[in-house]
Amino acid sequence: MQVHHKPTKILIVGKSGSGKTTYLLRYIKHSEHAHVFIFDHKLEFQEREGIPVSCSIDECVERLKKGEKYISYHYAAEFPGDSETAFQFYSEWVFEVCKVLREDGKSRLFAADEVNRFTGTADMGWSFRQLIEDGRLQGLDFIGTSHAANQIHNRLRLQLSEIVALRTLDPRPLAFLEENGFDPEAVKALPTGAFIVKDLDTDEFTTGKLFSCAREKNEVIPREEQEPSPAPPTPQEQDHALSRPTENRSLPGGGSGPQ
């Protein structure tokens, strides 16, 4: 159990086309996490960054055993037409995997684009809630995007360590940002690709740009990626722990893992 892990939970907010997904992609490509688990519901990570996608949890397990850093999952084969149940299923699988791997002391990251598609203000789902609220003890961080931050469940909002604001004109997400100390007029005036970041632990603001040749001095983009992390331990006795944790357990909304 990683009791001293300082959690990072980032929400990226902005209107369509403002640069949310680009920020997310750049963040994970420069991440120093040992593994990055991606819920790639639109295959955008694969198409834009060449991150190979797995169409089953079994494929995810094999990639993990090979020591691959990016474990990306697309739900259509196992949960056709049901992205919400698939999101909860993958959230729990990632959480259980990180419980197995946590003893190495390394941090890992769960990434999801358009997280408001899979959760809401009334119910964020038990599995995703567990990942967000208890992931710290497993060394598990989170980054996600939303064009409708007002639709994000309060349990997620309360766990955030950082908010990234790109341009938006919608009064509802602007109200959310203002509640967290942003100047809504400054957010509305942002050009495409420019962003304002608030560290919710220190209340400090920084700014930067995604679409520029040279990086700004204060641009909040991680350092260049180092050598790939060593392959995680995969002794024979861990094989079962890396299998489907939710296969026979009911999920929020009445769904269940693939049969």
Image (tube, helix red, strand yellow):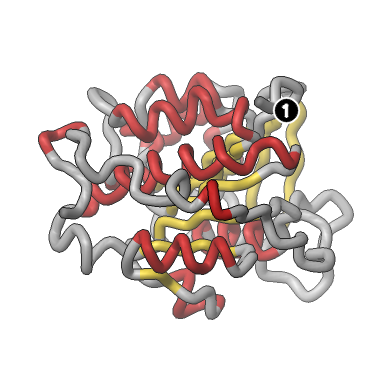
For residue 99, side relative to residue 89 (left or right) = right
The one of 169 and 123 positioned closer to us in this rendering: 123
- The amino acid at mark 1 is Lys
Quadrant including the C terminus = bottom left
| Residue at x-position 48% and y-position 70% | 45
Is the residue 120 above or below the residue 40 in the image?
A: above
Helix, strand or loop at label 1? It is loop
Is the residue 171 above or below the residue 38 in the image?
A: above
For residue 69, side relative to residue 53 (left or right) = right
Residue 2 is situated, as x and y percent measured from the top left of the image, at: 69, 27
For residue 121, side relative to residue 79 (left or right) = right
Residue 135 is situated, as x and y percent measured from the top left of the image, at: 55, 31
| Residue at x-position 60% and y-position 32% | 138
| Residue at x-position 31% and y-position 33% | 151
Is the residue 186 above or below the residue 228 in the image?
A: above
Q: Does residue 187 show up?
A: no
Dot 1 crowding, Cα within 10 Å, few <14, some 14–19, many 20+: some
Q: Which residue is mark 1?
A: 6
